[in-house]
Image (spheres, grey):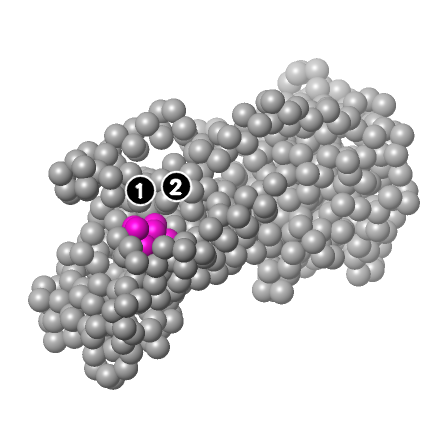
Amino acid sequence: MRRVVVAVCLAGLLLYPVVNPWQPYPQAVLLLAFLLAIQASGWNIISGYAGYISLGHSMFLGLGSYTVGILATRWGVNPLLVAPLGGVTAVVIALLIGSVVLRTRGHVFVIITIAMLLAAQVLVTNAGSLTQGSDGITLELPFWSRDYQNIPFYYLFLGLLVVTVAFSGWLRRTKFGTGLVAIREDEGKAASIGVNTTRSKVTAYAASAFFIGVAGGVYAYYLTFINPAGSFAILGSVTIVLAALAGGRGTLYGPVVGAFLVQLLSEAATVYGGGTQARVLMFGLALVIVVLFLPRGILPTVQDWWRRRHPVAVQYTDQEGALSRAAATIVEPVRREPGKPLLEVRGVSKRFGGLTAVDNADLTVREGSITALIGPNGSGKTTLFNLISGGLTADSGEIRFDGQRIDTLPPWTRGHLGLGRTYQVTRLFKNMTVQENVVAPLPDARWRTMLSGAVKGHEAERARELLDLVGLGRMAHQPAGALSYGQQKLVELAQVLMLEPRLILLDEPAGGVNPSLLDRLTEVIREVNARGVTFLVVEHNIPLVLDLCDPVIVFSRGAALAEGPPEIIRQDPLVLDAYLGEAVV
Protein backbone atom coordinates (compact mmCIF):
# COMPACT_ATOMS: atom_id res chain seq x y z
CA MET A 1 0.00 0.00 0.00
CA ARG A 2 2.81 2.41 0.87
CA ARG A 3 4.51 1.79 -2.47
CA VAL A 4 1.27 2.33 -4.35
CA VAL A 5 0.65 5.65 -2.59
CA VAL A 6 4.22 6.82 -3.29
CA ALA A 7 3.99 5.79 -6.95
CA VAL A 8 0.65 7.61 -7.41
CA CYS A 9 1.95 10.80 -5.78
CA LEU A 10 5.15 10.73 -7.83
CA ALA A 11 3.21 10.15 -11.06
CA GLY A 12 0.95 13.09 -10.23
CA LEU A 13 3.91 15.38 -9.59
CA LEU A 14 5.60 14.28 -12.81
CA LEU A 15 2.50 14.93 -14.88
CA TYR A 16 1.44 18.22 -13.29
CA PRO A 17 3.60 20.55 -15.47
CA VAL A 18 2.46 18.65 -18.56
CA VAL A 19 -1.22 18.96 -17.70
CA ASN A 20 -0.94 22.57 -16.49
CA PRO A 21 2.18 24.12 -18.08
CA TRP A 22 1.10 27.77 -18.22
CA GLN A 23 0.82 28.56 -14.52
CA PRO A 24 4.32 29.25 -13.13
CA TYR A 25 3.11 30.22 -9.67
CA PRO A 26 1.86 26.76 -8.58
CA GLN A 27 5.02 25.29 -10.10
CA ALA A 28 7.14 27.67 -8.00
CA VAL A 29 5.26 26.72 -4.82
CA LEU A 30 5.77 23.02 -5.52
CA LEU A 31 9.45 23.31 -6.41
CA LEU A 32 10.06 25.19 -3.16
CA ALA A 33 8.28 22.33 -1.39
CA PHE A 34 10.68 19.95 -3.17
CA LEU A 35 13.61 22.05 -1.96
CA LEU A 36 12.38 22.00 1.64
CA ALA A 37 11.76 18.23 1.41
CA ILE A 38 15.35 17.70 0.19
CA GLN A 39 16.68 19.63 3.19
CA ALA A 40 14.37 17.87 5.66
CA SER A 41 15.29 14.43 4.28
CA GLY A 42 19.00 15.28 4.58
CA TRP A 43 18.52 16.63 8.10
CA ASN A 44 16.67 13.42 8.96
CA ILE A 45 19.83 11.33 8.46
CA ILE A 46 21.74 12.95 11.32
CA SER A 47 18.85 14.23 13.44
CA GLY A 48 16.16 11.63 12.75
CA TYR A 49 18.18 8.43 12.45
CA ALA A 50 21.09 9.29 14.76
CA GLY A 51 19.18 11.62 17.09
CA TYR A 52 21.60 14.59 16.97
CA ILE A 53 19.34 17.62 16.55
CA SER A 54 20.85 20.31 14.31
CA LEU A 55 19.40 23.83 14.13
CA GLY A 56 21.97 25.05 11.63
CA HIS A 57 21.43 22.74 8.67
CA SER A 58 20.42 25.52 6.27
CA MET A 59 24.11 26.45 6.40
CA PHE A 60 24.78 23.70 3.85
CA LEU A 61 22.23 25.19 1.45
CA GLY A 62 24.06 28.50 1.69
CA LEU A 63 27.47 26.86 1.25
CA GLY A 64 26.25 25.08 -1.87
CA SER A 65 24.76 28.29 -3.25
CA TYR A 66 27.93 30.31 -2.71
CA THR A 67 30.20 27.57 -4.06
CA VAL A 68 28.23 27.41 -7.30
CA GLY A 69 27.84 31.19 -7.51
CA ILE A 70 31.56 31.85 -7.09
CA LEU A 71 32.67 29.10 -9.50
CA ALA A 72 30.07 29.96 -12.15
CA THR A 73 30.99 33.65 -12.24
CA ARG A 74 34.77 33.10 -12.11
CA TRP A 75 34.91 30.22 -14.58
CA GLY A 76 32.18 31.53 -16.86
CA VAL A 77 30.23 28.25 -16.86
CA ASN A 78 26.58 27.44 -16.38
CA PRO A 79 25.76 27.02 -12.64
CA LEU A 80 24.11 23.65 -13.25
CA LEU A 81 27.42 22.19 -14.42
CA VAL A 82 29.10 22.94 -11.09
CA ALA A 83 26.08 22.26 -8.85
CA PRO A 84 27.53 18.90 -7.67
CA LEU A 85 30.57 20.80 -6.35
CA GLY A 86 28.21 22.58 -3.98
CA GLY A 87 27.50 19.19 -2.46
CA VAL A 88 31.22 18.42 -2.26
CA THR A 89 31.86 21.67 -0.40
CA ALA A 90 29.02 20.90 2.02
CA VAL A 91 30.47 17.42 2.70
CA VAL A 92 33.99 18.75 3.32
CA ILE A 93 32.74 21.42 5.74
CA ALA A 94 30.49 18.88 7.45
CA LEU A 95 33.43 16.52 7.96
CA LEU A 96 35.56 19.30 9.45
CA ILE A 97 32.80 20.58 11.73
CA GLY A 98 31.40 17.17 12.60
CA SER A 99 34.73 15.79 13.79
CA VAL A 100 34.67 18.49 16.48
CA VAL A 101 31.05 19.29 17.36
CA LEU A 102 29.82 15.68 17.38
CA ARG A 103 31.83 15.12 20.55
CA THR A 104 28.93 16.91 22.27
CA ARG A 105 25.23 16.07 22.48
CA GLY A 106 21.93 17.47 23.62
CA HIS A 107 21.50 21.20 24.13
CA VAL A 108 25.21 21.87 23.65
CA PHE A 109 25.17 20.35 20.16
CA VAL A 110 22.05 22.33 19.22
CA ILE A 111 23.62 25.61 20.32
CA ILE A 112 26.87 24.87 18.48
CA THR A 113 25.02 24.19 15.20
CA ILE A 114 23.25 27.55 15.49
CA ALA A 115 26.60 29.21 16.15
CA MET A 116 28.07 27.54 13.04
CA LEU A 117 25.23 28.95 10.91
CA LEU A 118 25.71 32.47 12.24
CA ALA A 119 29.50 32.19 11.90
CA ALA A 120 29.12 31.17 8.25
CA GLN A 121 26.99 34.25 7.60
CA VAL A 122 29.60 36.52 9.21
CA LEU A 123 32.47 34.91 7.28
CA VAL A 124 30.71 35.20 3.92
CA THR A 125 29.78 38.81 4.64
CA ASN A 126 33.37 39.76 5.48
CA ALA A 127 35.07 37.81 2.67
CA GLY A 128 34.21 40.52 0.16
CA SER A 129 36.96 39.73 -2.33
CA LEU A 130 35.56 36.25 -2.78
CA THR A 131 31.84 36.52 -2.06
CA GLN A 132 31.12 40.21 -2.87
CA GLY A 133 30.19 40.65 0.78
CA SER A 134 26.73 42.00 1.57
CA ASP A 135 26.27 43.04 -2.08
CA GLY A 136 25.79 39.41 -3.02
CA ILE A 137 26.44 37.55 -6.27
CA THR A 138 24.33 37.90 -9.40
CA LEU A 139 24.17 34.92 -11.75
CA GLU A 140 23.18 34.67 -15.41
CA LEU A 141 19.58 34.10 -16.35
CA PRO A 142 18.49 30.57 -17.29
CA PHE A 143 19.46 29.68 -20.83
CA TRP A 144 16.09 28.18 -21.84
CA SER A 145 13.17 30.05 -23.33
CA ARG A 146 10.80 31.96 -21.08
CA ASP A 147 8.01 29.86 -22.51
CA TYR A 148 9.12 27.03 -20.22
CA GLN A 149 8.89 29.23 -17.13
CA ASN A 150 9.79 27.17 -14.00
CA ILE A 151 9.34 23.74 -15.57
CA PRO A 152 13.08 22.86 -15.86
CA PHE A 153 13.71 23.87 -12.23
CA TYR A 154 10.59 21.97 -11.21
CA TYR A 155 11.96 18.73 -12.64
CA LEU A 156 15.49 19.38 -11.37
CA PHE A 157 14.30 19.76 -7.78
CA LEU A 158 11.88 16.83 -8.12
CA GLY A 159 14.71 14.63 -9.42
CA LEU A 160 16.96 15.71 -6.56
CA LEU A 161 14.19 14.93 -4.09
CA VAL A 162 13.70 11.41 -5.48
CA VAL A 163 17.44 10.72 -5.34
CA THR A 164 17.70 12.13 -1.79
CA VAL A 165 14.81 10.00 -0.48
CA ALA A 166 16.16 6.92 -2.28
CA PHE A 167 19.59 7.50 -0.73
CA SER A 168 18.07 7.98 2.73
CA GLY A 169 16.03 4.80 2.34
CA TRP A 170 19.05 2.78 1.18
CA LEU A 171 21.10 4.13 4.08
CA ARG A 172 18.44 3.13 6.59
CA ARG A 173 18.39 -0.43 5.23
CA THR A 174 22.13 -0.94 5.79
CA LYS A 175 23.94 -1.94 8.97
CA PHE A 176 25.20 1.66 9.02
CA GLY A 177 21.58 2.83 9.21
CA THR A 178 20.73 0.43 12.02
CA GLY A 179 23.87 1.63 13.78
CA LEU A 180 22.66 5.23 13.56
CA VAL A 181 19.30 4.32 15.08
CA ALA A 182 21.14 2.33 17.75
CA ILE A 183 23.12 5.49 18.58
CA ARG A 184 19.87 7.41 18.92
CA GLU A 185 18.33 4.77 21.17
CA ASP A 186 21.35 3.97 23.39
CA GLU A 187 24.76 5.24 22.34
CA GLY A 188 26.63 3.33 25.05
CA LYS A 189 25.02 0.04 24.05
CA ALA A 190 25.70 0.75 20.37
CA ALA A 191 29.40 1.17 21.11
CA SER A 192 29.48 -2.11 23.05
CA ILE A 193 28.24 -4.08 20.02
CA GLY A 194 30.98 -2.78 17.75
CA VAL A 195 29.39 0.38 16.32
CA ASN A 196 32.10 3.00 15.95
CA THR A 197 29.90 5.83 17.18
CA THR A 198 32.38 8.59 16.30
CA ARG A 199 32.85 7.49 12.69
CA SER A 200 29.14 6.78 12.25
CA LYS A 201 28.06 10.21 13.49
CA VAL A 202 30.60 12.14 11.41
CA THR A 203 29.74 10.09 8.30
CA ALA A 204 26.02 10.65 8.84
CA TYR A 205 26.57 14.39 9.28
CA ALA A 206 28.48 14.53 6.00
CA ALA A 207 25.91 12.37 4.20
CA SER A 208 23.12 14.64 5.42
CA ALA A 209 24.83 17.67 3.85
CA PHE A 210 25.58 16.47 0.31
CA PHE A 211 22.21 16.73 -1.42
CA ILE A 212 21.40 19.94 0.46
CA GLY A 213 24.61 21.44 -0.97
CA VAL A 214 23.72 20.31 -4.51
CA ALA A 215 20.20 21.72 -4.11
CA GLY A 216 21.77 24.98 -2.91
CA GLY A 217 23.64 25.27 -6.19
CA VAL A 218 20.47 24.74 -8.23
CA TYR A 219 18.58 27.14 -5.98
CA ALA A 220 21.18 29.85 -6.60
CA TYR A 221 20.60 29.51 -10.34
CA TYR A 222 16.84 29.61 -9.78
CA LEU A 223 17.09 32.88 -7.82
CA THR A 224 19.96 34.27 -9.97
CA PHE A 225 21.00 36.23 -6.88
CA ILE A 226 22.42 35.20 -3.51
CA ASN A 227 23.42 37.20 -0.44
CA PRO A 228 24.55 36.29 3.12
CA ALA A 229 21.32 37.24 4.88
CA GLY A 230 19.15 35.12 2.61
CA SER A 231 21.52 32.16 2.28
CA PHE A 232 22.23 31.69 5.98
CA ALA A 233 18.91 32.63 7.61
CA ILE A 234 18.08 30.96 10.92
CA LEU A 235 14.43 30.81 9.86
CA GLY A 236 15.44 28.41 7.10
CA SER A 237 16.84 25.95 9.64
CA VAL A 238 13.75 26.25 11.84
CA THR A 239 11.60 25.48 8.80
CA ILE A 240 13.62 22.33 8.09
CA VAL A 241 13.21 21.10 11.66
CA LEU A 242 9.50 21.91 11.69
CA ALA A 243 8.94 19.99 8.44
CA ALA A 244 10.71 16.87 9.73
CA LEU A 245 8.99 16.99 13.12
CA ALA A 246 5.55 17.54 11.60
CA GLY A 247 5.85 14.65 9.18
CA GLY A 248 7.67 12.24 11.46
CA ARG A 249 11.34 12.45 12.42
CA GLY A 250 13.24 9.22 11.83
CA THR A 251 10.80 7.93 9.19
CA LEU A 252 11.58 7.83 5.46
CA TYR A 253 8.62 9.78 4.08
CA GLY A 254 7.73 11.84 7.14
CA PRO A 255 10.09 14.74 6.29
CA VAL A 256 8.65 14.85 2.74
CA VAL A 257 5.04 14.97 3.95
CA GLY A 258 5.95 17.59 6.54
CA ALA A 259 7.80 19.70 3.97
CA PHE A 260 4.80 19.87 1.65
CA LEU A 261 2.50 20.74 4.54
CA VAL A 262 4.80 23.44 5.94
CA GLN A 263 5.49 24.98 2.52
CA LEU A 264 1.81 25.19 1.63
CA LEU A 265 0.95 26.73 5.01
CA SER A 266 3.87 29.14 4.67
CA GLU A 267 2.68 30.25 1.24
CA ALA A 268 -0.85 30.70 2.53
CA ALA A 269 0.42 32.82 5.43
CA THR A 270 2.43 34.97 3.01
CA VAL A 271 -0.44 35.49 0.58
CA TYR A 272 -3.35 35.83 2.99
CA GLY A 273 -1.68 36.79 6.25
CA GLY A 274 0.41 39.77 5.31
CA GLY A 275 3.94 38.49 4.71
CA THR A 276 6.97 37.45 6.75
CA GLN A 277 5.60 38.27 10.20
CA ALA A 278 2.59 36.05 9.58
CA ARG A 279 4.93 33.26 8.47
CA VAL A 280 7.00 33.51 11.64
CA LEU A 281 3.85 33.46 13.79
CA MET A 282 2.52 30.48 11.85
CA PHE A 283 5.79 28.57 12.30
CA GLY A 284 5.74 29.23 16.04
CA LEU A 285 2.14 28.07 16.44
CA ALA A 286 2.74 25.03 14.24
CA LEU A 287 5.78 24.03 16.29
CA VAL A 288 3.79 24.27 19.53
CA ILE A 289 0.95 22.17 18.06
CA VAL A 290 3.34 19.50 16.80
CA VAL A 291 5.18 19.25 20.13
CA LEU A 292 1.98 19.12 22.21
CA PHE A 293 -0.35 17.04 20.05
CA LEU A 294 1.81 15.23 17.47
CA PRO A 295 5.13 14.63 19.25
CA ARG A 296 5.98 11.72 16.92
CA GLY A 297 4.71 13.41 13.74
CA ILE A 298 1.87 12.76 11.33
CA LEU A 299 2.98 9.49 9.75
CA PRO A 300 3.86 7.66 13.02
CA THR A 301 0.56 8.84 14.53
CA VAL A 302 -1.37 7.50 11.53
CA GLN A 303 0.55 4.21 11.71
CA ASP A 304 -0.27 3.84 15.41
CA TRP A 305 -3.93 4.48 14.67
CA TRP A 306 -3.89 1.86 11.91
CA ARG A 307 -2.27 -0.73 14.20
CA ARG A 308 -4.92 -0.13 16.84
CA ARG A 309 -7.64 -0.64 14.24
CA HIS A 310 -5.90 -3.74 12.82
CA PRO A 311 -4.16 -5.47 15.75
CA VAL A 312 -1.66 -8.25 15.06
CA ALA A 313 -2.02 -11.53 16.91
CA VAL A 314 0.44 -11.86 19.80
CA GLN A 315 3.41 -14.09 19.01
CA TYR A 316 4.94 -16.28 21.68
CA THR A 317 8.35 -17.86 21.94
CA ASP A 318 8.50 -21.13 20.04
CA GLN A 319 9.53 -23.25 23.01
CA GLU A 320 9.47 -26.50 21.06
CA GLY A 321 11.86 -25.21 18.40
CA ALA A 322 13.76 -22.72 20.55
CA LEU A 323 17.47 -23.21 21.05
CA SER A 324 17.58 -26.36 18.92
CA ARG A 325 21.02 -27.50 17.88
CA ALA A 326 20.39 -27.38 14.14
CA ALA A 327 18.66 -24.00 14.03
CA ALA A 328 21.67 -21.80 13.30
CA THR A 329 25.26 -21.82 12.19
CA ILE A 330 27.48 -20.29 14.86
CA VAL A 331 30.65 -18.70 13.53
CA GLU A 332 33.56 -20.64 14.98
CA PRO A 333 36.45 -18.50 16.26
CA VAL A 334 40.05 -19.25 15.39
CA ARG A 335 41.18 -22.15 17.56
CA ARG A 336 43.55 -21.09 20.30
CA GLU A 337 45.52 -22.95 22.93
CA PRO A 338 42.98 -24.40 25.43
CA GLY A 339 43.48 -23.10 28.94
CA LYS A 340 45.54 -20.11 27.82
CA PRO A 341 44.60 -16.85 29.63
CA LEU A 342 42.18 -14.96 27.39
CA LEU A 343 41.06 -12.19 29.76
CA GLU A 344 43.34 -10.87 32.48
CA VAL A 345 42.33 -8.22 35.02
CA ARG A 346 45.24 -6.96 37.11
CA GLY A 347 44.96 -4.51 40.01
CA VAL A 348 41.86 -2.81 38.64
CA SER A 349 40.06 -0.29 40.85
CA LYS A 350 37.06 1.98 40.35
CA ARG A 351 35.77 4.58 42.76
CA PHE A 352 32.65 6.72 42.69
CA GLY A 353 33.42 9.54 45.10
CA GLY A 354 33.93 7.92 48.47
CA LEU A 355 32.57 4.54 47.33
CA THR A 356 35.01 1.90 46.10
CA ALA A 357 33.08 -0.37 43.73
CA VAL A 358 36.08 -2.40 42.49
CA ASP A 359 39.10 -2.61 44.77
CA ASN A 360 42.42 -3.73 43.25
CA ALA A 361 40.72 -6.70 41.61
CA ASP A 362 42.58 -9.57 39.93
CA LEU A 363 40.82 -12.05 37.66
CA THR A 364 41.75 -14.50 34.89
CA VAL A 365 39.40 -16.12 32.38
CA ARG A 366 40.98 -18.95 30.43
CA GLU A 367 40.37 -19.84 26.79
CA GLY A 368 37.49 -22.24 26.28
CA SER A 369 36.11 -22.06 29.83
CA ILE A 370 32.68 -21.11 31.16
CA THR A 371 33.76 -19.08 34.15
CA ALA A 372 31.23 -17.90 36.74
CA LEU A 373 31.52 -14.64 38.65
CA ILE A 374 29.21 -14.80 41.66
CA GLY A 375 28.78 -12.73 44.79
CA PRO A 376 26.20 -10.82 46.83
CA ASN A 377 24.45 -7.75 45.46
CA GLY A 378 26.68 -4.68 45.55
CA SER A 379 29.91 -6.66 45.38
CA GLY A 380 31.05 -4.91 42.15
CA LYS A 381 30.36 -7.60 39.53
CA THR A 382 28.47 -5.40 37.07
CA THR A 383 30.93 -2.55 37.56
CA LEU A 384 33.74 -4.95 36.66
CA PHE A 385 31.82 -5.96 33.53
CA ASN A 386 31.50 -2.28 32.58
CA LEU A 387 35.24 -1.80 33.04
CA ILE A 388 36.03 -4.82 30.86
CA SER A 389 33.61 -3.86 28.06
CA GLY A 390 34.54 -0.16 28.07
CA GLY A 391 31.41 1.35 29.55
CA LEU A 392 33.55 2.73 32.41
CA THR A 393 37.21 3.70 32.70
CA ALA A 394 39.28 2.17 35.49
CA ASP A 395 41.02 4.47 37.96
CA SER A 396 44.02 2.13 38.11
CA GLY A 397 45.22 -1.28 36.93
CA GLU A 398 45.11 -2.86 33.49
CA ILE A 399 42.92 -5.23 31.50
CA ARG A 400 44.32 -7.52 28.80
CA PHE A 401 42.47 -9.51 26.17
CA ASP A 402 44.46 -12.25 24.45
CA GLY A 403 47.64 -10.55 25.63
CA GLN A 404 46.65 -7.11 24.29
CA ARG A 405 45.94 -4.29 26.71
CA ILE A 406 42.39 -3.04 26.08
CA ASP A 407 41.55 -0.74 29.00
CA THR A 408 42.60 2.28 26.89
CA LEU A 409 40.61 1.19 23.81
CA PRO A 410 37.10 2.44 22.94
CA PRO A 411 34.24 -0.04 23.43
CA TRP A 412 33.72 -0.69 19.71
CA THR A 413 37.36 -1.70 19.23
CA ARG A 414 36.99 -4.21 22.07
CA GLY A 415 33.93 -5.57 20.27
CA HIS A 416 35.92 -5.91 17.04
CA LEU A 417 38.57 -7.89 18.96
CA GLY A 418 35.87 -10.40 19.92
CA LEU A 419 34.54 -9.15 23.27
CA GLY A 420 30.75 -9.16 23.61
CA ARG A 421 28.40 -8.70 26.53
CA THR A 422 24.78 -8.78 27.61
CA TYR A 423 23.26 -6.63 30.35
CA GLN A 424 21.56 -7.35 33.65
CA VAL A 425 18.67 -5.15 32.56
CA THR A 426 18.23 -5.64 28.83
CA ARG A 427 19.27 -2.71 26.67
CA LEU A 428 17.69 -3.54 23.34
CA PHE A 429 16.86 -0.77 20.90
CA LYS A 430 13.15 -0.74 21.59
CA ASN A 431 12.02 1.25 18.51
CA MET A 432 13.90 -1.02 16.11
CA THR A 433 12.56 -4.35 14.91
CA VAL A 434 13.86 -7.56 16.42
CA GLN A 435 15.78 -8.37 13.24
CA GLU A 436 17.38 -4.92 13.14
CA ASN A 437 18.52 -5.38 16.74
CA VAL A 438 20.30 -8.58 15.80
CA VAL A 439 21.77 -7.17 12.57
CA ALA A 440 23.11 -3.99 14.24
CA PRO A 441 26.39 -5.40 15.72
CA LEU A 442 29.57 -4.80 13.69
CA PRO A 443 32.20 -7.54 14.13
CA ASP A 444 34.88 -5.46 12.36
CA ALA A 445 35.67 -1.93 11.24
CA ARG A 446 35.45 -2.51 7.47
CA TRP A 447 33.28 -0.17 5.40
CA ARG A 448 32.02 -3.18 3.44
CA THR A 449 30.54 -4.65 6.62
CA MET A 450 29.14 -1.28 7.66
CA LEU A 451 27.33 -0.78 4.34
CA SER A 452 26.04 -4.35 3.98
CA GLY A 453 22.29 -4.93 3.98
CA ALA A 454 20.34 -5.11 7.22
CA VAL A 455 17.08 -6.21 5.57
CA LYS A 456 18.38 -8.46 2.79
CA GLY A 457 21.61 -10.30 2.11
CA HIS A 458 23.99 -12.44 4.13
CA GLU A 459 23.81 -10.36 7.32
CA ALA A 460 20.02 -10.48 7.42
CA GLU A 461 20.01 -14.21 6.73
CA ARG A 462 22.41 -14.83 9.59
CA ALA A 463 20.29 -12.68 11.90
CA ARG A 464 17.22 -14.75 11.08
CA GLU A 465 19.17 -17.96 11.77
CA LEU A 466 20.16 -16.66 15.20
CA LEU A 467 16.58 -15.64 15.92
CA ASP A 468 15.46 -19.14 15.01
CA LEU A 469 18.10 -20.37 17.44
CA VAL A 470 16.39 -18.59 20.33
CA GLY A 471 12.87 -19.39 19.10
CA LEU A 472 11.96 -15.86 17.99
CA GLY A 473 12.25 -16.17 14.22
CA ARG A 474 8.53 -15.46 13.73
CA MET A 475 8.88 -12.14 15.57
CA ALA A 476 11.70 -10.77 13.41
CA HIS A 477 9.69 -7.81 12.12
CA GLN A 478 8.01 -6.81 15.36
CA PRO A 479 9.30 -3.88 17.45
CA ALA A 480 11.71 -5.09 20.11
CA GLY A 481 9.88 -3.04 22.72
CA ALA A 482 6.77 -5.17 22.23
CA LEU A 483 8.53 -8.33 23.48
CA SER A 484 8.32 -9.69 27.00
CA TYR A 485 11.35 -9.27 29.25
CA GLY A 486 12.38 -12.89 28.83
CA GLN A 487 12.10 -12.64 25.06
CA GLN A 488 14.26 -9.53 25.10
CA LYS A 489 16.91 -11.49 27.00
CA LEU A 490 16.93 -14.09 24.24
CA VAL A 491 17.17 -11.44 21.52
CA GLU A 492 20.12 -9.87 23.33
CA LEU A 493 21.89 -13.24 23.35
CA ALA A 494 21.33 -13.57 19.60
CA GLN A 495 22.58 -10.00 19.18
CA VAL A 496 25.86 -10.78 20.93
CA LEU A 497 26.35 -13.95 18.86
CA MET A 498 26.02 -11.77 15.74
CA LEU A 499 29.19 -10.02 16.90
CA GLU A 500 31.13 -13.30 16.35
CA PRO A 501 32.74 -13.00 19.81
CA ARG A 502 35.59 -14.94 21.36
CA LEU A 503 34.50 -14.00 24.88
CA ILE A 504 30.95 -13.27 25.99
CA LEU A 505 30.21 -11.50 29.27
CA LEU A 506 26.78 -12.78 30.32
CA ASP A 507 25.17 -10.62 32.99
CA GLU A 508 22.40 -12.68 34.62
CA PRO A 509 21.28 -14.48 31.43
CA ALA A 510 18.57 -16.48 33.24
CA GLY A 511 16.87 -13.44 34.73
CA GLY A 512 13.31 -13.12 33.44
CA VAL A 513 13.58 -16.17 31.14
CA ASN A 514 10.82 -18.77 31.31
CA PRO A 515 12.13 -21.63 33.51
CA SER A 516 11.10 -24.14 30.85
CA LEU A 517 13.73 -22.58 28.54
CA LEU A 518 16.63 -22.61 30.99
CA ASP A 519 17.70 -26.16 30.13
CA ARG A 520 17.73 -25.34 26.44
CA LEU A 521 19.55 -22.06 27.12
CA THR A 522 22.19 -24.03 29.00
CA GLU A 523 22.51 -26.40 26.05
CA VAL A 524 23.12 -23.54 23.61
CA ILE A 525 25.75 -21.97 25.87
CA ARG A 526 27.52 -25.33 26.05
CA GLU A 527 27.29 -25.78 22.28
CA VAL A 528 28.67 -22.31 21.58
CA ASN A 529 31.40 -22.94 24.13
CA ALA A 530 32.28 -26.24 22.42
CA ARG A 531 32.88 -24.27 19.22
CA GLY A 532 35.55 -22.19 20.94
CA VAL A 533 33.65 -19.27 22.52
CA THR A 534 34.61 -18.46 26.11
CA PHE A 535 32.08 -17.24 28.69
CA LEU A 536 32.29 -15.15 31.85
CA VAL A 537 28.90 -15.42 33.56
CA VAL A 538 27.39 -13.33 36.36
CA GLU A 539 24.35 -15.17 37.69
CA HIS A 540 22.40 -15.40 40.95
CA ASN A 541 20.83 -18.73 40.01
CA ILE A 542 23.38 -20.78 41.93
CA PRO A 543 22.09 -24.23 40.84
CA LEU A 544 22.49 -23.09 37.22
CA VAL A 545 26.00 -21.79 37.94
CA LEU A 546 27.08 -25.00 39.65
CA ASP A 547 25.72 -27.08 36.79
CA LEU A 548 27.09 -24.94 33.93
CA CYS A 549 30.28 -23.21 35.04
CA ASP A 550 33.81 -24.27 35.90
CA PRO A 551 35.66 -22.52 37.47
CA VAL A 552 33.69 -20.26 39.81
CA ILE A 553 35.06 -16.93 41.06
CA VAL A 554 33.47 -15.35 44.12
CA PHE A 555 33.46 -11.55 44.27
CA SER A 556 32.98 -9.64 47.50
CA ARG A 557 33.61 -5.98 48.37
CA GLY A 558 35.05 -5.24 44.93
CA ALA A 559 37.64 -8.03 44.78
CA ALA A 560 37.92 -11.77 44.18
CA LEU A 561 37.42 -13.67 47.43
CA ALA A 562 37.79 -17.26 46.25
CA GLU A 563 38.19 -19.27 43.05
CA GLY A 564 37.88 -22.95 42.22
CA PRO A 565 35.65 -25.78 41.00
CA PRO A 566 31.94 -25.56 41.89
CA GLU A 567 32.05 -28.42 44.38
CA ILE A 568 34.82 -26.69 46.35
CA ILE A 569 33.33 -23.20 46.19
CA ARG A 570 29.93 -24.30 47.49
CA GLN A 571 31.59 -25.52 50.71
CA ASP A 572 34.04 -22.66 51.25
CA PRO A 573 33.31 -20.99 54.62
CA LEU A 574 34.47 -17.58 53.35
CA VAL A 575 31.97 -17.80 50.51
CA LEU A 576 29.18 -18.76 52.89
CA ASP A 577 30.07 -15.86 55.16
CA ALA A 578 30.02 -13.42 52.22
CA TYR A 579 26.55 -14.53 51.14
CA LEU A 580 25.18 -14.64 54.68
CA GLY A 581 26.57 -11.20 55.47
CA GLU A 582 29.03 -12.22 58.18
CA ALA A 583 32.26 -10.29 58.68
CA VAL A 584 35.07 -11.63 56.54
CA VAL A 585 38.45 -11.80 58.27
Is residue 493 found left or right of 411 in the rendered image?
right
- Residue 526: percent from left, percent from top: 86, 41
Q: In front: mark 1 or mark 2?
A: 1
Nearer-the-camera pick, 519 or 181: 181
Let me know if residue 74 is in the magenta part: no
Q: Residue at x 82, y 40 (%)?
A: 469
Q: Nearer the viewer, residue 42 or 25?
A: 25
Q: Nearer the viewer, residue 567 or 259?
A: 259
Q: Which residue is label 1 attached to?
A: 264
Write the start and end of the magenta stretch as one range.
Answer: 26-35
What's the residue at 65%, 56% (across, down)? Answer: 453
**Residue 216 circle label:** none
Q: Which amino acid, mark 1?
A: Leu
Q: What residue is shown at x 12% (from left), y 76% (from top)?
A: 129
Tell me: 266 left or right of 375. Answer: left
The answer, for residue 109, to whether it is visible in the render is no
Q: Which residue is mark 2?
A: 258
